[in-house]
Image (cartoon, rainbow, N blue to C red):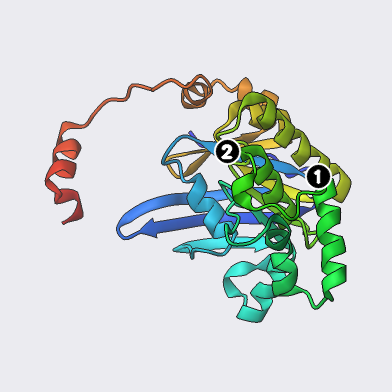
Amino acid sequence: MTQAQPAAPRRPVIEVQDLVTHYGDRQILKGIDFAVGEGEIMVIMGGSGSGKSTLLRHLLGLEHATSGSIRILGREISGLSGDEWRDMRRKMGVAFQGGALFSSMTVGENIKLPLMEHAELDASTMDIMMRLKLEVVDLAGFEDLWPAELSGGMIKRAALARAIILDPKVLFCDEPSAGLDPVVSAAIDDLILRLRDAMGMTIVVVTHELESTFKIADRITVLDRGQVRLIGTVDEVRGSPDARIQALLNRQMEDEPVDADEYLKRLTGEDRA
């Protein structure tokens, strides 16, 4: 059963209301409601197929919902023009899963790319800003290396440097510590906390890494089958009596009754007729 969301602790920076999405006839998001407060780290978590990646793409304006509303920094994003979106994206940073660095560009060139796209600055100023952000993510002096010369953790740090080069008000991170060993993963978690505290950013993290979630989250949005199952603090999520949430936290499969008629329809394709 979906539980009501507690009020956001600070002024809302992101507000999602009754968000519904379909891929063809299949409904993916089923009335998502949540808000993220100013300076808050909100972690969106859920099992495979829960809708968390789809939700992130909507927040980034990469996909359009069937219905519902997304407001970021007080603006309804569905109605933004091209120029308005460009202005909005100057205020949003994104650290993509896997880093998404361009292999044909040096680390420094990758980090400066948002400046070259969105800012009218001379080359020396961009170099200074790039080196400052490398300092922030503990990669000072690595600007002339190629992405292939970096470790997995260094790629994640470089991706974060690029995401914050424009000093965004909102930072989105997609699986920032996935695929890293525990020590490097913990360092990335610490970096995210430092970025929030030093720059006052509102941060949304999509992840399935429970240890990272419990370390960095102010609040957690748990998605299940395209719906919000629970929104709460780490302690509230850990202590939830909801069996599906506990199954997710303990990495257990939950047995459910199977409707034989519905199963047969899926196999024969009659459910799409």
Kind of residue sitting beneath label 1: Arg
Secondary structure of residue under mark 1 = helix
Residue depicted at 65% across the width and 32% down the height: 213
Residue lying at 80% horizontally and 52% vertically, measured from the top left: 11
Label 2 secondary element: loop
Task: Name the image quarter holding residue 169.
Answer: bottom right
10 Å neighbourhood of mark 2: few (<14), some, or many (≥20)? many
The dot on residue 55 is: none
Q: Quadrant of the C terminus?
A: bottom left
Q: Which residue is mark 1?
A: 196
Work out whether mark 2 precedes mark 1 in sequence or the reverse, and give the earlier one: 1
- Give percent across and percent down for residue 175: 58, 41
Q: Is residue 67 above or below residue 196?
A: below
Residue 114 appears left or right of 104: right
In the shown orientation, is residue 258 left or right of residue 115? left
The answer to which of 268 and 62 lies nearer the viewer is 62
Residue 81 visible (yes or no): no
Q: Position of residue 163 (x, y in %)?
A: 71, 56
Q: Which residue is mark 2?
A: 207
Splitting the image into 4 quarters, where does residue 194 fall? Answer: top right
In the rendered image, the vertical position of residue 143 relative to residue 179, given as above or below: below
Residue 181: % across, % down: 61, 27
Does residue 75 appear to the left or right of 260 in the view shown? right
Crowd tier of the residue under label 1, counting other residues whose Cα lies within 10 Å: few below 14, some 14–19, many 20 or above:
some
> Are the residues at dot 2 and dot 1 in contact (C-beta closer than 8 Å)?
no
Q: Check disc 2 and give the amino acid type.
A: Thr
Residue at (56%, 52%) from the top-left corner?
56
